[in-house]
Amino acid sequence: MKNLDTRIVVITGGSKGIGRSVAYKFAEEKARIILAHNDADDSASQETLDNLAHKGVEADAHRVDVSSFGAVDLLFKEIFSKFERVDVLINNAGITRDTLLMRMNEEDWDSVLNVNLKGVFNCTRAVVRSMIKERRGRIVNISSVVGQIGNAGQANYSASKAGIIGFTKTAAKELAGRSITVNGVAPGFIDTEMTAVLSEKVKESFLRQIPSGRMGKPEEVAEAVYWLCSDAASYVTGQIIHVNGGMYM
Ligand SMILES: NC(=O)c1ccc[n+]([C@@H]2O[C@H](COP(=O)([O-])OP(=O)(O)OC[C@H]3O[C@@H](n4cnc5c(N)ncnc54)[C@H](O)[C@@H]3O)[C@@H](O)[C@H]2O)c1
């Protein structure tokens, strides 16, 4: 007998940063959490799993490259054989390879598009049949403010994040009739490892563009993601929620 009360939640890029905060948010409802990441070592994912265990939540982590259709397919086959369904998919895995367009090489372009955009397709494709069968599901894709406004040095990244917006709206239209919602969250400038590597000069220039005058916290993004997955948002689909301190409105 399926326990429909415990939601099965898959979070890509769930080992740290925004994905980790999303996992902690789902821990509040005691969801069954599956993290996917592609870190070189397991230290961050282990820390996340330890904290989830401390909260009394069952979770596991898998190292998988979301840009590989075959690897993602295998992972979800394993998940379905264990849990029979996935209720929530958070497509959060993402990378940057920043450089000016003039210097951007093919590998910079391909790697970012493959992880950030193809990864969203691969994971969504892997869950969609089961969600249609269950006639329920929530998918949230993590885009970015730069997918809307662009950013010098991020042609690859902003294109991938803009692509996520088009993908989200199309998937929302295809799946709305089956009670599956597909939405996006577009964070602004959030305090994680991804932004920790930026120079002080770049950080200051970002901060000048934020009316709230500060970086966002991963937990502030997680709140929006979680709300989109709640019953309160059952009639919200195809939307992009901006969590950016007013950086873009
Ligand atoms: N931090 C920000 O300011 C910010 C702003 C807008 C959007 N975002 C987006 O939010 C998401 C999370 O960002 P973050 O700041 O928490 O990043 P992070 O660098 O802290 O974490 C990235 C996560 O993605 C995983 N990942 C990377 N490549 C992967 C791959 N090929 N397969 C599977 N997993 C992979 C990593 O293992 C890690 O778990 C990303 O999509 C990012 O583009 C971040």
Image (cartoon, rainbow, N blue to C red):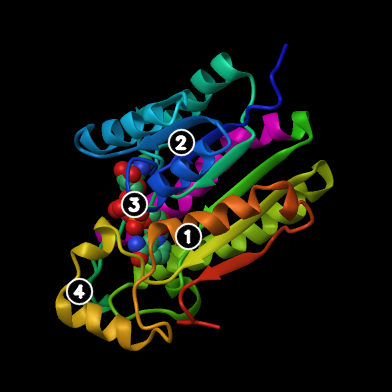
Towards the viewer: 118 or 201:
201
Towards the viewer: 194 or 109:
194
Of pointers 3 and 1, the one earlier in the residue sequence: 3
Residue type pointed to by label 2: Phe
Regarding mark 4 in the picture, which secondary structure is present there? Answer: helix
Q: Residue 221 shows which numbered tag? A: 1
Check contact, mark 2 vs mark 4: CB within 8 A.
no
Mark 2 — residue?
Answer: 69
Q: Residue 141: x percent and y percent?
A: 54, 54
For marks 1 and 2, give the CA distance.
Answer: 27 Å
Q: Residue 102: x percent and y percent?
A: 23, 78
Q: Which residues are magenta?
A: 107-131
Q: Residue 80: x percent and y percent?
A: 58, 20
Q: Residue 103 shows which numbered tag? A: 4
Mark 3 — residue?
Answer: 17
Check contact, mark 3 vs mark 2: CB within 8 A.
no
